[in-house]
Image (tube, rainbow, N blue to C red):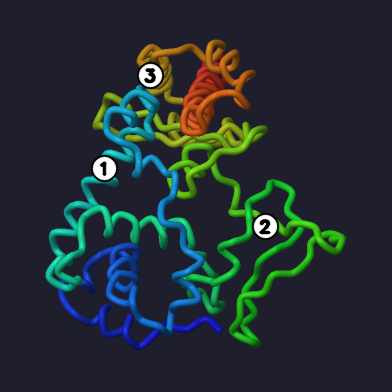
Amino acid sequence: MVQEHSSLSKLNESLPLANLSWETRLAVFLIVNRNNSQYTPLWEFLPTKIATPLSWPVDKLNLLLNGTHLLSEITKQREAISASFKIVEPHLPPTTTLADFTWAWQMFGSRVWDIELGDGKQGTAMVPVLDLVNHAANPKAEVDYSKETRRVEMVAAQDINAGEWLDISYGEKSSADLLKYYGFTVPENDSNESCVVEMMTGGEVCDFQVGMVEYSVKQCVGSNGKVDLTRLKELLDAIKRRLGEYPTTIDEDFELLRYIDFIDFDLANALRVRRAEKLCLSTVFEHGTTLL
């Protein structure tokens, strides 16, 4: 049953925790209750580490994600986690380190569900056991929340034979988001790939998705139902600059990915992210040029 634990409620009510992100508050909850026998069955299922870029050494992070928007996101994420740790450290056991806090933050960042509770309400919850189920684009099961039973339910989406692995969908996520939150990427994900372009005028940021390129370009450069040619040219120039900042071309990434089964796991994931960003930028550029 979905509910908020009383000790978490107390943490939420205490300042300065109440003003921090849910990831931070849940991370504090995990650390404070790490030796609480009530949660032992859950804690025993949690891995000691997760392969997201948050765990990578700085030199490896800069090398593998060089030129990507994800590198900037991870850098900001690390800074935010470090700043939050300084605020909540007085509430934690005295031996708690920044590495411990980062691990706890990752555990919840990769294992929570956004749940539609009905009546316009949305909740965030951990669902023990469900977080052991792998992601698939065409999953065997679906996850939903029942307002009647107030429980999260997993229901078969297709025939499942006895002994088969179960899988679910984590959502239509880009390679960057999959790596950022879960520590893996998947092949054949092109329609979900996304990219970000910062416009020079006003520092505005435009978001794009390959599967919705026409709509997202219109959102970026459209004005009163028409294409703003000045903004469009600015967008195309910005994409040219972005594509020139990567250490490899999209063709070189594609060639390297042919040997993905023989290269380092983190490198393989980084290659997919780099290729995906460039694919998105190139797709936006090609569509944009047709509007000139």
- Graded by Cα atoms within 10 Å as few (under 14), some (14 to 19) or many (20 or more), the crowding at tag 3 reads some
Tell me: 77 left or right of 126.
Answer: left
Mark 3 or mark 1: which is in front? 1
Q: Nearer the viewer, residue 54 or 75?
A: 54
User: Where does the N terminus fall, quadrant-wise?
Assistant: bottom right
In the displayed structure, 262 sits above or below 41; it is above
How far is mark 2 from mark 1, CA to CA?
30 Å
Kindly identify the residue that appears in the image at 21 percent across and 72 percent down.
Answer: 17
In this figure, which residue is indicated by the disc labeled 3?
242
Q: Type of residue at label 3?
A: Arg
In this figure, which residue is indicated by the disc labeled 1?
76
Q: Nearer the viewer, residue 166 or 224?
A: 166
In this figure, which residue is indicated by the disc labeled 2?
168
Say whether disc 2 or disc 1 marks the residue closer to the N-terminus: 1
Say whether disc 3 or disc 1 marks the residue closer to the N-terminus: 1
How far is mark 3 from mark 1, CA to CA?
19 Å
In the displayed structure, 182 sits above or below 244; it is below
Task: Give residue 158's position: percent from left, percent from top.
Answer: 84, 59
- Graded by Cα atoms within 10 Å as few (under 14), some (14 to 19) or many (20 or more), the crowding at tag 1 reads few
Task: Give residue 100's position: percent from left, percent from top.
Answer: 28, 58
Q: Type of residue at label 1?
A: Lys
Q: Quadrant of residue 71?
A: top left
Q: Type of residue at label 2?
A: Ile
> Is there any visible trace of residue 201 in the rendered image?
yes
Task: Give residue 114's position: percent from left, percent from top.
Answer: 50, 65
Tell me: 155 left or right of 116.
Answer: right
Task: Give residue 197's position: percent from left, percent from top.
Answer: 38, 28
In the displayed structure, 97 sits above or below 117; it is above
Tag 2 and tag 1, C-beta contact below 8 Å: no
| Residue at disc 2, secondary structure | strand
Mark 2 or mark 3: which is in front? 2
